[in-house]
Amino acid sequence: MKALFLIITLGLLAALEAQDPLSFPLETQDITGTWYVNAIVADNDLPKERRPRKVSPVTVTALDGGDLEIMFTFLKQGQCHEKREVMRPTEEPGKYITNEGRKHVYIFELPVEDHYVFYCEAQRHGKRFRAGKLLGRNPDVNQEALDAFKKFTQREGLPQEDIFTPALMESCDPESD
């Protein structure tokens, strides 16, 4: 009887995995190169005035030991800033840590070609912070990928009404803001 229960349970798990490709993180896909932020959502009631109106492409570089370096540029208080973060892989496929383990980043491949979700969990000022970014190889938003991102964010309990699409910033120019 226990064996039958185990077989049925494993069969249901396999069916669920096949049904929802967003359930399992990245394993072996090559995510290096240039990516464009197609959509962003955060759960901390980020005021509209604090949302990034323009974002640069994100560059992902593979480092030794499976580490990834993420680099992007942003505009803050009229000045351009370049941000680099090294993400270290964990034992869990698709899960990385950064900021000395204070931030966890999960990379999920979407069923739409060349689209991923970067999902972040962290503590900021003693409060839990979660955010997701839809990244694509193309700066144009793919509606099918956006729909998959919405499904992902809904499953994670992130507010659908807070999903926004920032403008692309090819180069940092404080005058163009």
Image: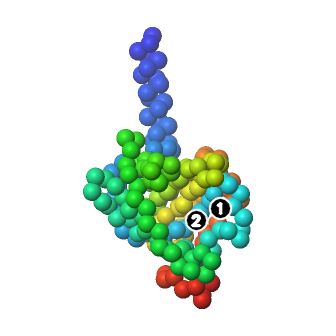
CA gap between label 1 and label 2 equals 7 Å
**Residue 13 percent location from the top left of the image:** 47, 32
Q: Local crowd at mark 1 within 10 Å, few (<14), some, or many (≥20)?
A: some
Indicate which disc residue 163 carries: 1
Can the viewer see residue 124?
A: yes
Of residues 52 and 94, the one nearer the viewer is 52
Q: How did the renderer colour the structure? A: rainbow
> In the current view of this chain or complex, which residue is farthest to the bottom?
175
Q: Secondary structure at mark 1?
A: loop
**Residue 156 percent location from the top left of the image:** 60, 46
> In the current view of this chain or complex, which residue is farthest to the left?
64
Q: Secondary structure at mark 2?
A: strand
In the rendered image, which quarter contains the N terminus? Answer: top left
**Residue 98 percent location from the top left of the image:** 45, 53
Above or below, comparing residue 31 to residue 7 in the picture: below
Of residues 40 and 105, the one nearer the viewer is 105
- Which residue is at 58% across, 85% downward? 174
The residue beneath circle 2 is 39
Give the residue type at disc 1: Ile
